Amino acid sequence: ILNVEQSPQSLHVQEGDSTNFTCSFPSSNFYALHWYRWETAKSPEALFVMTLNGDEKKKGRISATLNTKEGYSYLYIKGSQPEDSATYLCAFIYNSGGYQKVTFGTGTKLQVIP
Amino acid sequence: DSGVTQTPKHLITATGQRVTLRCSPRSGDLSVYWYQQSLDQGLQFLIQYYNGEERAKGNILERFSAQQFPDLHSELNLSSLELGDSALYFCASSVGPGAGTEAFFGQGTRLTVV
Protein backbone atom coordinates (compact mmCIF):
# COMPACT_ATOMS: atom_id res chain seq x y z
CA ILE A 1 0.00 0.00 0.00
CA LEU A 2 1.51 3.31 -1.06
CA ASN A 3 1.77 6.18 1.36
CA VAL A 4 0.14 9.46 0.39
CA GLU A 5 0.46 12.07 3.09
CA GLN A 6 -1.33 15.35 3.44
CA SER A 7 -0.33 18.10 5.78
CA PRO A 8 -1.48 19.68 7.88
CA GLN A 9 -4.31 17.38 9.02
CA SER A 10 -6.43 20.36 9.93
CA LEU A 11 -6.22 24.10 9.65
CA HIS A 12 -8.15 27.06 11.03
CA VAL A 13 -7.72 30.37 9.23
CA GLN A 14 -9.41 33.75 9.43
CA GLU A 15 -11.58 34.92 6.57
CA GLY A 16 -9.38 36.73 4.07
CA ASP A 17 -6.19 34.84 4.93
CA SER A 18 -4.40 32.89 2.26
CA THR A 19 -3.39 29.36 2.99
CA ASN A 20 -1.75 26.34 1.44
CA PHE A 21 -1.39 22.67 2.11
CA THR A 22 0.68 19.78 0.84
CA CYS A 23 0.16 16.36 -0.68
CA SER A 24 3.24 14.11 -0.69
CA PHE A 25 3.37 10.95 -2.75
CA PRO A 26 5.92 8.44 -4.08
CA SER A 27 7.85 9.83 -7.03
CA SER A 28 7.83 6.57 -9.01
CA ASN A 29 5.13 5.18 -11.34
CA PHE A 30 3.32 8.50 -11.36
CA TYR A 31 0.29 8.76 -13.62
CA ALA A 32 -1.81 11.63 -12.27
CA LEU A 33 -2.71 13.57 -9.17
CA HIS A 34 -6.23 14.72 -8.42
CA TRP A 35 -7.38 17.30 -5.88
CA TYR A 36 -10.89 17.06 -4.48
CA ARG A 37 -12.94 19.28 -2.24
CA TRP A 38 -15.21 17.39 0.14
CA GLU A 39 -17.83 19.23 2.12
CA THR A 40 -19.52 17.53 5.04
CA ALA A 41 -22.57 15.47 4.02
CA LYS A 42 -21.75 15.88 0.33
CA SER A 43 -19.71 13.88 -2.16
CA PRO A 44 -16.15 14.78 -3.23
CA GLU A 45 -15.95 17.34 -5.99
CA ALA A 46 -13.00 17.38 -8.37
CA LEU A 47 -10.88 20.53 -8.30
CA PHE A 48 -7.89 19.68 -10.44
CA VAL A 49 -6.46 16.84 -12.49
CA MET A 50 -2.69 17.21 -12.80
CA THR A 51 -0.61 14.99 -15.01
CA LEU A 52 2.62 16.79 -15.92
CA ASN A 53 5.58 17.75 -13.80
CA GLY A 54 5.49 21.50 -13.32
CA ASP A 55 1.73 21.71 -13.92
CA GLU A 56 0.05 24.72 -12.42
CA LYS A 57 -3.71 24.90 -12.43
CA LYS A 58 -6.07 27.61 -11.22
CA LYS A 59 -9.78 27.84 -10.57
CA GLY A 60 -10.87 31.16 -9.12
CA ARG A 61 -9.04 31.70 -5.85
CA ILE A 62 -7.73 28.15 -5.71
CA SER A 63 -4.59 26.98 -7.47
CA ALA A 64 -2.33 23.95 -7.39
CA THR A 65 1.20 23.05 -8.42
CA LEU A 66 2.79 19.69 -9.08
CA ASN A 67 6.33 18.38 -8.71
CA THR A 68 6.43 14.72 -9.75
CA LYS A 69 10.21 14.41 -9.43
CA GLU A 70 10.18 15.18 -5.72
CA GLY A 71 6.68 13.81 -5.14
CA TYR A 72 4.58 16.69 -3.91
CA SER A 73 1.72 18.95 -4.85
CA TYR A 74 0.64 22.19 -3.20
CA LEU A 75 -2.88 23.54 -3.04
CA TYR A 76 -3.24 27.28 -2.44
CA ILE A 77 -6.33 29.21 -1.46
CA LYS A 78 -6.10 32.98 -1.76
CA GLY A 79 -8.32 35.14 0.44
CA SER A 80 -10.12 32.25 2.18
CA GLN A 81 -13.88 32.52 2.54
CA PRO A 82 -16.20 30.61 4.94
CA GLU A 83 -17.56 28.65 1.99
CA ASP A 84 -14.05 27.25 1.43
CA SER A 85 -14.45 25.26 4.65
CA ALA A 86 -14.16 21.62 3.63
CA THR A 87 -11.78 18.70 3.59
CA TYR A 88 -9.32 18.83 0.70
CA LEU A 89 -8.24 15.42 -0.55
CA CYS A 90 -5.51 14.49 -2.96
CA ALA A 91 -5.59 11.24 -4.91
CA PHE A 92 -2.38 9.73 -6.26
CA ILE A 93 -2.90 7.68 -9.39
CA TYR A 94 -0.04 5.37 -10.30
CA ASN A 95 0.80 2.62 -12.73
CA SER A 96 0.85 -0.88 -11.32
CA GLY A 97 0.98 -4.11 -13.31
CA GLY A 98 -0.38 -2.49 -16.43
CA TYR A 99 -3.27 -0.86 -14.57
CA GLN A 100 -3.77 2.43 -12.81
CA LYS A 101 -4.49 2.37 -9.12
CA VAL A 102 -5.63 5.13 -6.80
CA THR A 103 -4.55 5.95 -3.28
CA PHE A 104 -6.14 8.88 -1.45
CA GLY A 105 -4.47 10.99 1.17
CA THR A 106 -6.24 11.41 4.51
CA GLY A 107 -7.14 14.99 3.71
CA THR A 108 -6.63 18.45 5.15
CA LYS A 109 -9.66 19.77 6.97
CA LEU A 110 -9.93 23.52 6.50
CA GLN A 111 -12.10 25.70 8.70
CA VAL A 112 -12.41 29.36 7.69
CA ILE A 113 -13.53 31.54 10.58
CA PRO A 114 -15.68 34.57 9.60
CA ASP B 1 -25.73 17.46 -8.99
CA SER B 2 -22.80 15.55 -10.49
CA GLY B 3 -24.98 13.48 -12.81
CA VAL B 4 -23.90 10.23 -11.14
CA THR B 5 -26.81 8.40 -9.53
CA GLN B 6 -26.45 5.88 -6.75
CA THR B 7 -29.21 3.76 -5.27
CA PRO B 8 -30.24 3.13 -2.64
CA LYS B 9 -29.15 6.09 -0.52
CA HIS B 10 -29.35 4.09 2.70
CA LEU B 11 -29.33 0.38 3.38
CA ILE B 12 -29.58 -1.48 6.66
CA THR B 13 -29.01 -5.19 6.67
CA ALA B 14 -27.92 -8.02 8.96
CA THR B 15 -24.58 -9.78 9.15
CA GLY B 16 -24.23 -12.64 6.71
CA GLN B 17 -26.54 -11.08 4.16
CA ARG B 18 -25.84 -9.97 0.60
CA VAL B 19 -26.63 -6.58 -0.90
CA THR B 20 -26.30 -4.92 -4.29
CA LEU B 21 -25.47 -1.27 -4.74
CA ARG B 22 -26.22 0.37 -8.03
CA CYS B 23 -24.55 3.22 -9.91
CA SER B 24 -25.56 5.04 -13.08
CA PRO B 25 -22.68 7.08 -14.48
CA ARG B 26 -22.95 10.50 -16.08
CA SER B 27 -24.18 10.44 -19.64
CA GLY B 28 -21.21 9.77 -21.91
CA ASP B 29 -18.89 8.49 -19.19
CA LEU B 30 -17.49 5.04 -19.82
CA SER B 31 -15.50 4.54 -16.61
CA VAL B 32 -17.01 3.71 -13.26
CA TYR B 33 -15.07 3.62 -10.00
CA TRP B 34 -16.18 2.26 -6.64
CA TYR B 35 -14.86 3.59 -3.33
CA GLN B 36 -15.44 2.74 0.31
CA GLN B 37 -15.27 5.20 3.16
CA SER B 38 -15.34 3.59 6.58
CA LEU B 39 -15.74 5.59 9.80
CA ASP B 40 -12.13 5.29 10.78
CA GLN B 41 -10.57 5.42 7.34
CA GLY B 42 -10.38 7.73 4.39
CA LEU B 43 -11.53 6.91 0.91
CA GLN B 44 -10.39 3.50 -0.28
CA PHE B 45 -10.42 2.64 -3.95
CA LEU B 46 -12.13 -0.68 -4.62
CA ILE B 47 -12.40 -1.27 -8.35
CA GLN B 48 -12.74 0.40 -11.74
CA TYR B 49 -14.60 -0.66 -14.88
CA TYR B 50 -14.23 0.84 -18.31
CA ASN B 51 -16.78 0.11 -21.01
CA GLY B 52 -17.80 -3.15 -19.40
CA GLU B 53 -14.37 -4.48 -18.55
CA GLU B 54 -12.48 -4.48 -15.29
CA ARG B 55 -9.74 -1.90 -15.55
CA ALA B 56 -8.13 -1.66 -12.14
CA LYS B 57 -8.50 -3.26 -8.77
CA GLY B 58 -7.75 -1.74 -5.41
CA ASN B 59 -8.35 -3.04 -1.90
CA ILE B 60 -11.47 -5.00 -2.73
CA LEU B 61 -12.31 -8.00 -0.57
CA GLU B 62 -13.03 -11.37 -2.16
CA ARG B 63 -16.54 -11.18 -0.69
CA PHE B 64 -17.15 -8.14 -2.87
CA SER B 65 -17.61 -8.14 -6.62
CA ALA B 66 -18.70 -5.67 -9.23
CA GLN B 67 -19.68 -5.53 -12.84
CA GLN B 68 -20.53 -2.98 -15.48
CA PHE B 69 -23.42 -3.71 -17.81
CA PRO B 70 -23.81 -2.90 -21.53
CA ASP B 71 -25.84 0.21 -20.65
CA LEU B 72 -22.79 1.24 -18.55
CA HIS B 73 -24.49 1.16 -15.18
CA SER B 74 -22.54 -0.72 -12.55
CA GLU B 75 -23.39 -2.83 -9.55
CA LEU B 76 -21.30 -3.58 -6.49
CA ASN B 77 -22.24 -6.83 -4.78
CA LEU B 78 -21.30 -7.28 -1.14
CA SER B 79 -21.82 -10.73 0.36
CA SER B 80 -21.39 -12.45 3.72
CA LEU B 81 -21.62 -9.02 5.25
CA GLU B 82 -19.75 -8.24 8.44
CA LEU B 83 -20.17 -5.38 10.89
CA GLY B 84 -16.95 -3.87 9.58
CA ASP B 85 -18.45 -3.51 6.11
CA SER B 86 -20.62 -0.67 7.39
CA ALA B 87 -19.46 2.32 5.39
CA LEU B 88 -20.32 4.92 2.82
CA TYR B 89 -19.86 3.50 -0.66
CA PHE B 90 -19.23 6.00 -3.43
CA CYS B 91 -19.38 5.53 -7.13
CA ALA B 92 -17.64 7.92 -9.50
CA SER B 93 -17.52 8.14 -13.27
CA SER B 94 -15.24 9.67 -15.85
CA VAL B 95 -15.04 9.84 -19.60
CA GLY B 96 -11.85 7.94 -20.29
CA PRO B 97 -10.24 4.70 -19.22
CA GLY B 98 -7.38 6.31 -17.39
CA ALA B 99 -7.33 8.62 -14.44
CA GLY B 100 -6.10 11.62 -16.36
CA THR B 101 -9.64 12.92 -16.56
CA GLU B 102 -11.87 14.36 -13.91
CA ALA B 103 -14.05 11.96 -11.94
CA PHE B 104 -17.53 12.89 -10.78
CA PHE B 105 -18.85 11.35 -7.60
CA GLY B 106 -22.34 10.21 -6.73
CA GLN B 107 -23.94 10.98 -3.39
CA GLY B 108 -23.03 7.60 -1.96
CA THR B 109 -24.88 4.67 -0.44
CA ARG B 110 -24.66 4.40 3.31
CA LEU B 111 -24.59 0.76 4.31
CA THR B 112 -25.21 -0.22 7.90
CA VAL B 113 -24.67 -3.83 8.88
CA VAL B 114 -26.29 -4.79 12.18
Image: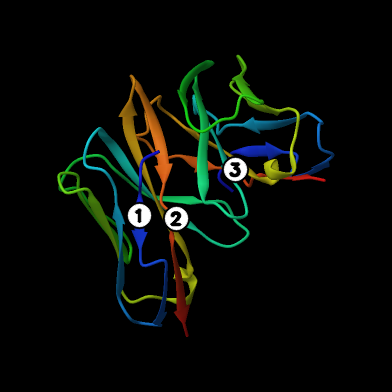
Seen from the viewer's position, the closer of residues A5 and A110 is A5
Chain letter for the residue marked with disc 3 in the picture: B
- Residue B92 appears in the figure: yes
Seen from the viewer's position, the closer of residues B102 and A101 is A101
Tag 2 and tag 1, C-beta contact below 8 Å: yes
Secondary structure of residue under mark 3? loop
Give how far across and how far down residue A63 sits, in percent: 28, 60
Residue corresponding to mark 1? A5
In which quadrant of the rendered view does residue B60 lie?
A: top right
Residue visible at 36% across and 58% down?
A6
**B66 vs B113: above or below:** above
Q: Distance from label 1 to label 3 (Cα)?
A: 25 Å
The three-letter code of the residue at mark 2 reads Thr
Q: Distance from label 2 to label 1 (Cα)?
A: 7 Å
Mark 1 vs mark 3: in front: 1
**A8 vs B4: above or below:** below
Disc 2 with disc 3 on a shared chain: no
Drawn side of residue A103 relative to residue B88, left or right? left
Secondary structure of residue under mark 1? strand
- Point out which mark residue B106 bears: 3
- Could you classify mark 3 by the number of other residues whose Cα lies within 10 Å: few (under 14), some (14-19), or many (20 or more)? many
The three-letter code of the residue at mark 1 reads Glu
The three-letter code of the residue at mark 3 reads Gly
Secondary structure of residue under mark 2? loop
Residue corresponding to mark 2? A106
